Image (spheres, rainbow, N blue to C red):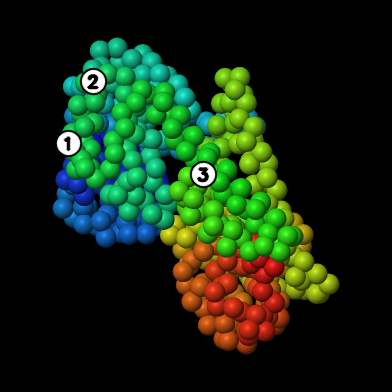
Amino acid sequence: MKIGIIGTGYVGLPTGVGFAELGNKVVCIDKDEVKIKALKAGKLTIFEDGLETLFQQNVRDGRLGFTSSTAEGVKEADVVLIAVGTPPDPVTKEADLHYIYSAAAELAPHLTGYTVIATKSTVPVGTGDEVEKIIRKNNPHAEFDVVSLPEFLREGFAVHDFFAPDRIVVGINNSRAESVLKEMYKPFEGKAPVLFVNRRSAETIKYASNAFLAMKIHYINEMADFCEKAGADIFDVAKGMGLDRRIGERFLNPGPGYGGSCFPKDTNAMAWMGKKYGAPLTLIEAAIRGNDLRKTKMAERILRQVQGIKQAKIAVWGLAFKNGTDDVRESPALQIVEQMLKNGARLCVFDPKAMGNASRVLGDSVEYASSELEAAKDADVLAILTEWDNFASVNLTELKAIMRQPKIVDLRNMLKSKQPERLGFVYQCIGKI
């Protein structure tokens, strides 16, 4: 099949590489000429674990191409995936659909033959209806159908999730589009359930899923706070909860709060839609408020460790919102860093992949280190904010020797199994006294 993908970000690029690896002819489209030039030269513009090898292989084999021309990308395509951003409105927090609608208007004149147009971006309920109207207005004679294909790729695990999905959800309103999409997803037959629903249901599924997971994260974080006060151990509590198959063990890891490009944006958008349709989503609204407040509480937890110390140095390990990606959008780590900076803290930071993206946000307000140990040198406290594997394998004896004061605030519970207290560290993790 020939597949066009509009957008080369954290959704579009892994999706394009994945479909190319399955043997399709894929053309990725982006208006950013600099980005397209880099991709054509064989340079990935995002970091995603495991993506580089597949990217290079499919470019080399001619199955994956790039263009800034919408006409070139969608010409004779069987399926066009719209995978552009839907950032939150700064005031209402509803999803901004400007890029979606612009993509629909731009592709419409270039459709040749029957084409399935799929919204891969996370979009509010009813967006498919509007996309259909826009295409019809700009090309009344076009032969097409609009479907919803919500993506469930986790950043840092996008390659794995593409080839081993939990489920594939397809929102369609007629059987002609269904036959095309069954062909596109044929390699997944017997490997993952494929759920065909109407378009509005598919649009809702993505938001409902992300909002539920965000609430689960916030719940275990509040339970961790309770355990610290009550003398319980959140790790034992989470294990006991997870053994109940109705609850499950995933997303029961306490931390600094949920973040990233999906959960904050999607919970806010879902809450806005609840108000729009007169069906208030009070649990989601409470999780949003609590998660926002948690970043401030976590910053205060770190700052208490240097209270009264003149010109204290705080070392920060981790700036990406999670391991396996260089994405810092809505990163809890960055939000905590920014909160500490507001309080006049002096910070030296390190992240193995996200330094470039983080520096565009933080500028010269922090010091940048080339390694975790360089960041920790002469520090009065170390704050671990992202769960990179190499942080867990640090030599604690060496770490203690270079720090001015042996204090660690581990907001990802990376070192709890190594018992840093035995070496004389003042160690604080989440959910345990």
Q: Which is more toward the observer, 207 or 242?
A: 242
Q: Nearer the viewer, mark 3 or mark 2?
A: 3
Mark toward the viewer: 3 or 1: 3
Expressed as whole percent of the image width and height from the top left, the position of residue 262 reads 50, 43
**Quick check: 47 above or below 312?**
above
- CA neighbours of label 1 inside 10 A, class few (<14), some (14 to 19), many (20+): some
> How far apart are labels 3 and 2 at the CA level?
32 Å
Q: Report whether residue 70 is seen.
A: no
Residue nearest the observer in this picture, 353 or 410: 410
Q: Is residue 167 left or right of residue 358?
A: left
- The residue that label 1 is drawn on is 1
Quadrant containing the C terminus in the rendered view: bottom right
Percent coordinates x, y for residue 73 in the rendering: 26, 35
User: Disc 2 designates what residue?
Assistant: 175
Viewer-nearest residue: 254 or 312: 254
Q: CA distance from mark 2 to mark 1?
A: 18 Å
Please give the label number shown on residue 213: 3
Quadrant of the image for the N terminus? top left
SS at circle 2: helix
Please count the marks in the image: 3
Query: Label 1 near label 3: C-beta < 8 Å?
Result: no
Q: Disc 3 to disc 1, how far (Cα)?
A: 34 Å
